[in-house]
Image (cartoon, grey):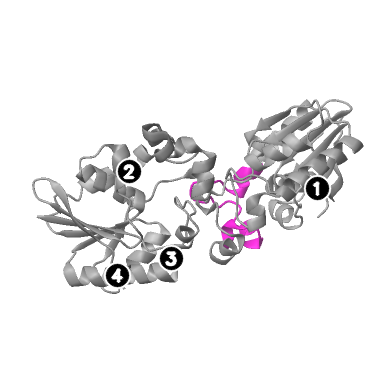
Amino acid sequence: MTTLLLLRHGETTWNEQSRMQGWAPVGLTDRGHEQARRAGALIADEYDPHRLVSSDLVRARETTARVGEAVDTEPTFDPAWRERGLGDFQGLTVEALFGGFPEYSLKSSGAAALTARPPNGESVLDVRERVLGAWEELLDDGGTVLVVTHGGPIAAVLGAVRGQDALTGALENWTGNGTLTEVAVESEPRVVRTLDPGASR
Amino acid sequence: MTTLLLLRHAESEWNRAGRMQGWAPVGLTDRGREQAAAAGEHIAEEYDVDGVLASDLRRSERTAERAAPAGVEPVFQQAWRERDVGVYQGLAYDDIEDRFPEFGLNEPAAQHADRVPDSGESLVKLRERVLAAWDAICRDGSEEETVLVVTHGGPIRLVLGHVRGQDLSAALLSYSPDNCALAEIEIDTASDTPAADAEVRRENVTLGGS
């Protein structure tokens, strides 16, 4: 059986400011480092991943480095696990982006927003396709794999695992910074549980 | 003789916040809107503008809409955009200078003018793009014409440096236009080499006060 663990990176300065990050090289806050450290401790206690795949963006790399203090698994960095590339919209606040450009808001524009591609960026469906390609390669691993990635990719994966359409998947599977989700793959993958070690003080 | 006026866009929200903008669609502050209107008044008093070209990025578009003389519709062009800074867009200037100085605004950036930021463009590429637009103005300019170009700090530095015969590094480091600063260049359209014979008449005329 394959066990897949999806860990969202710890809180960053831009998460704190509600600023859309895309591929920006933004680092973790003190809180984000602590979330990542706690996630690492929990993973070391409860799992034994033999493989660690991480997005190559700075916030995921920093999270992976913290996790590595407890989990002794050599990471590989894969751009397929990056967050959505936001192109010219990178750095706008959530309010400026979705208020100023409602055609990109899944909440206001529904399924039409799935294919809205910012100039020089990716659509939600572009990311879903990129991420599910990388995800499918892990399904028959046979062991435990830890994936350190981002909110968008995790929502895309969990939506697919739950058999939801792309819009429902993107809207209903948002996870917090430092949250760990366990997916078990037998005949079909299923979500086992979601843990938020950083929040449980 | 063609008179070319280069106007830097007015203060934007990210200018005020000290954030690297690149191609981000960021609007003007209240102060920026005042600067743009004041620039428009000054230009209308001092010049008889025949045409307005502007970068199609939001901050210059909004500036051009306020600064263009009545009856002259700005023509928006991608060629006059600021450098595309790719994944560094949105970072604070001091953060960039601290962690990624090769993509900032100071000497390390000038020394690495050929470096391409992930998903962005190099300073060398920016200069090619902007100087192609400059050459088109020199080539197509006619006698007694005044053209206003509303653009950004990078393109203005590169055009003025080019006219002065400076290399890219000197062009970037020796001059820094303020928001809504105006520069004036005379282009001798009768010359066989108008681009080479152009002359900077005025620079960094600050409009709109504080």
Query: Of the residues tagged 1 and 3, which is closer to the observer?
Result: 3
Residue A40 falls in image quadrant: bottom left
Crowd around label 3: few <14 · some 14–19 · many ≥20 (10 Å): many
Amino acid type, label 2: Ala
Q: According to the image, label 3 marks what residue?
A: A28
Which quarter of the figure is the N terminus of chain B placed in?
A: top right
Q: CA distance from mark 4 to mark 1?
A: 63 Å
Circle 4 sits in a helix, a strand or a loop, which is it? loop
Residue hosting label 2:
A170
Secondary structure found at label 1: loop
Name which residue type carries label 3: Leu
Q: CA distance from mark 2 to mark 1?
A: 54 Å
Q: Position of residue A138 (x, y in %)?
A: 19, 51
Is residue B122 covered in magenta? yes
Image marks 2 and 1: residues in contact by CB distance under 8 Å: no
Please name the residue that numbered disc 1 is placed on.
B164
Element type at marker 2? helix
The residue type indicated by label 1 comes to: Arg
Task: Kindly identify which residue carries mark 4.
Answer: A200
Stretch in magenta? B101-127
Residue A74 locus on image (x, y percent): 26, 66
Kindly report which numbered mark, 2 or 3, lies closer to the viewer in this rendering: 2
